[in-house]
Image (cartoon, rainbow, N blue to C red):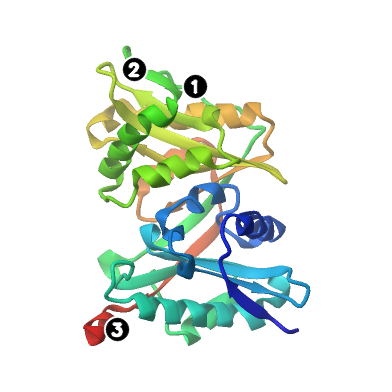
Amino acid sequence: MNITERSYAGAADLSLMSDLARRSFSENMHVTDLPYRLSSWGMDDPDNIRLWLDEGEQILGWAIMQNPFWVIDIVCSPSIERELYPRILAWADRRASQIAGTGLGLPAWFVNVFSCQKDRISALEQAGFKCQSDHGEDSWSKVLMKRSGNNPVKTFSPPEGYLVRPLAGIAEVAAYVDLHRSVFGTKNMTVDWRLNTLKNPAYRSDLDIVVQSPDGSLVAFCICWLGKDPPVGQIEPLGCHEDYRKYGLGRVALAEGLKRLCSLGVEDIYVETDNFRNTAFRLYESFDFKVIHEVLVYGKDYDKVASQSN
């Protein structure tokens, strides 16, 4: 097969990229929540995105250097994976080296794969990526979890004075960003990124859940995403301010989000979490989420490339 590649051509490509992910749903960790990831500032530079196509200009694969996540998002048609996946990694390696030492560069980049995706693992290892699951305190692996949309959702009421409700639109974006940064200890979330999610056609304001404290500040959140083909849901992201975790507000927000998704008739609901986040893992288990995939994280260092370019 003659495979060509090209740069990202703007918003018109987003639906093509999402469609490919849906067609290979079982091979990808992020499908339903793609609107969240495709709104990030990693998309701001078109050179961070690449598409591969067949002779009929049908998309076969794509990759994004997702700076906010330190991750290379890759979607590849399973029918052409053995040939195409190594080519995608080669492009990502060149791009990571090209931007090393610049504002877009990172000291390391990571790729997520299911433990059963042996061909992808082999390609990653041949490309110099190493599994991060056995690095002592720095070990990193994940799981993809699923629960049935038919299972009843436990009810949890917030403490007196706390309010569970949808985000109040654009007017509350800055407050959300401040909370998100505090929860995850990073400034990667930006006002523009959050505004982009609100503008995405797949965004539903009724699934953008926040918890408001008695003083009016936002203290927890659970953003849910709805997919129509198949009818599924996904949680991304979920968080609670450290000072309020003793009240179980993350659990309250999650319960509200799950109830709303279930009321919309979803078949299944997915969530991804890091293995080392034991609190989050136990929380999802308590809501009947079950592990369906072990997710391996493969990483490659580029700090030496950066130092050589300076």
Q: Position of residue 278 (x, y in %)?
A: 36, 48
Q: Amino acid at mark 2?
A: Tyr
Tell me the quarter of the image containing the C terminus.
bottom left
At x 44%, y 35%, the residue is 222
> Where does label 3 land, which residue?
305
Q: Nearer the viewer, residue 48 or 69?
A: 48
Q: Amino acid at mark 1?
A: Thr
Q: Quadrant of residue 137?
A: bottom left
The alpha-carbon separation of the residues under discs 3 and 1 comes to 52 Å
> Where does label 2 land, which residue?
162
Most distant residue in the top direction: 160
Instruction: Please report contact status of discs 2 and 3: CB closer than 8 Å, yes or no.
Output: no
Mark 3 or 1, closer to the camera = 3
Q: Amino acid at mark 3?
A: Val
User: Mark 2 vs mark 1: which is more N-terminal?
Assistant: 1
- Secondary structure at badge 3 equals helix
The alpha-carbon separation of the residues under discs 2 and 1 comes to 15 Å
User: Mark 3 vs mark 1: which is more N-terminal?
Assistant: 1
Rendered image: mark on residue 155: 1
Tell me the quarter of the image containing the N terminus.
bottom right
